[in-house]
Amino acid sequence: MNLSEFNSAEFTQFVQDHLEEDPALLLFKYQGKVGFDLKVAVQQIAARQKASKKLPSWSKNLNLLFPASISVEQCSSELTAAFKAAGRRGGWMVDLTGGFGVDCYHLSQGFEKGVYCEQQNELFQISTHNLSTLNPGKFDFVEGDGLDYLQKTTQRFDLIYADPARRGTGNQKLYKLQDCEPNVVEAWPLLKSKSDSILLKVSPMLDLTQAWTELPDLQKITVVSVRNEVKELLLHWDKAIEGAPRIISVVDLDSGFPPFEFEPSAEEQAHSQFAEAGKYLVEPLAGILKAGAFNRFGERFGLKKLERNSHLYTSENFTIGIPGRVFEVLREISPKKQETKAIFPSGKVNVICRNYVMGAEELKKKLELKDGGEDYLIGTQTATGFKLYWCKRVQ
């Protein structure tokens, strides 16, 4: 890969001038009219447009280069990377699976030296350029297998970080840790021998119980969400707190909610109380549901569940700031077109189905409704059967 062309003034100016334009039209309009590889320039523009929300400052920095889209799609956002880095300090850190380098860059900020490892040549070249541009002299760069490097180096690290690849042959998604690359379960003794702190980013689809089973030494799992969408799981091990109780922490970034933390053993000992829908319905944050805090959530906030598998809660009052969406129940209605047409003449209402007889899309089709407006229609199951509630969101 030749990086010199990326650094030409004409190339950079073209990217800057056309950042807001349609990449496909640019290819058609400027074919044969520029003195650089137009396709590469347009790829840079398209990648920056795709990354503008995920990587706002990187996408605006014309001194940085962007790789193929899949690398950008799989990398952390600046928001989640900064969260991972918060409070971490030390001498040396290593990222065994460097990728596009977003996590490596942010994590390295609190360390004297960062080591970036990556096997893919093009990605290695791009990230070497980017990290050297962002923080000259901070990084050592290793092209090759991160575990091989770790095995051979005499350096000891204050933090080992890895984001195991979750796609195997045929591009299928992998959710077991030992099926990912690198196999951190197999390499666990090596990781522990080289550092007193290990942080792993894994698929949000990984079962938390499976993670504890595969790596029993883990002391903490963090479920990281952004505005109520689960993005990643973080697995923590620190030698300094060996023997401490296991903790699950749910963090919802950009929402203002405080972290929700609990011990898995406390969830096992907690018991739900049940009731029909009262004045309010509460839907916990997606991260809390992912964490499996079904009993602990209701117990902590004094809420009752509608039904064991519905994961909706009810109360006659609620505490402001409860981590989830809160709806005021206006009334129960029947799933008939005549009634919904009378209540929602525009045909617009936000439909939510949780443990209902059908999914939201099927219900909308049946009742000829579209998402929109300020009203909510919540379909769920209680102890007395399937119910449909007309609601207003109050938090």
Image (cartoon, rainbow, N blue to C red):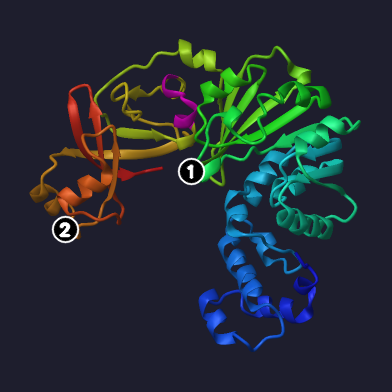
The residue under label 2 is 345
Residue 69: within the magenta?
Answer: no
Q: Residue at x 65, y 72 (%)?
A: 40
Q: Residue at x 72, y 66 (%)?
A: 61
Amino acid type of the residue tagged 2 in the rendering: Pro
Q: Are marks 2 and 1 in contact (CB under 8 Å)?
A: no
The outermost residue toward the left is 338
Q: Residue at x 31, y 21 (%)?
A: 308
The residue under label 1 is 229
Image coordinates for residue 35, horizontal then vertical, percent = 72, 85
Magenta residues, start to end: 288-295
Image coordinates for residue 319, horizontal then vertical, percent = 44, 32
Callout 1: helix, strand or loop? strand
Callout 2: helix, strand or loop? loop
Residue 169 visible at all: yes
- For the N terminus, the quadrant is bottom right
- Direction from residue 196 to residue 229 in the image, left or right: left
Q: Residues within 10 Å of mark 2 (few under 14, many from 20)?
A: few
Q: State which quadrant residue 41 falls in.
A: bottom right
